[in-house]
Image (cartoon, grey):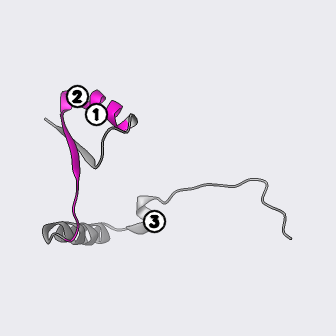
Amino acid sequence: MREPPRSIRVSYPVFFDHIPTREQLLARSAELFDLVRRGRLSIEIGGRYPLGDAALAHRDLEARTTTGKLLLLP
């Protein structure tokens, strides 16, 4: 039986690991917006906050009282 590692390194993917060039970024973005436009991907807006209430939006996120995406509006 192998001995377990004495330390474990946890890492996370970086955006450029998946989309390294501007051309790929534009192609993937176009694909994403096309899926939204055709109704194959829905985006839930969980709340709209005036920009001046950004601190409140942050507190709501921390308190886990929101679902979906939050928008900060001018």
Q: Which residue is mark 2?
A: 53
The secondary element bearing badge 3 is classed as helix
User: At label 3, which amino acid type do we have?
Assistant: Asp
Q: Which residue is mark 1?
A: 57
Question: Which one is in front in this view, the residue at disc 3 or the one at disc 2?
Answer: 2
Nearest to the observer: residue 17 or residue 58: 58
Residue stretch in magenta: 40-61
User: At label 1, which amino acid type do we have?
Assistant: Ala
Q: Position of residue 3 (x, y in %)?
A: 84, 63
The quadrant where residue 72 appears: top left
Is the residue marked by circle 3 packed among few (<14), some (14-19), or many (20+) residues within 10 Å? Answer: few
Q: Is residue 2 above or below residue 44?
A: below
| Mark carried by residue 17 | 3
Q: CA distance from mark 1 to mark 2?
A: 6 Å
| Mark carried by residue 28 | none
Q: Is residue 42 above or below residue 73?
A: below
| Rendered residue at 38%/34% (across/down) | 63
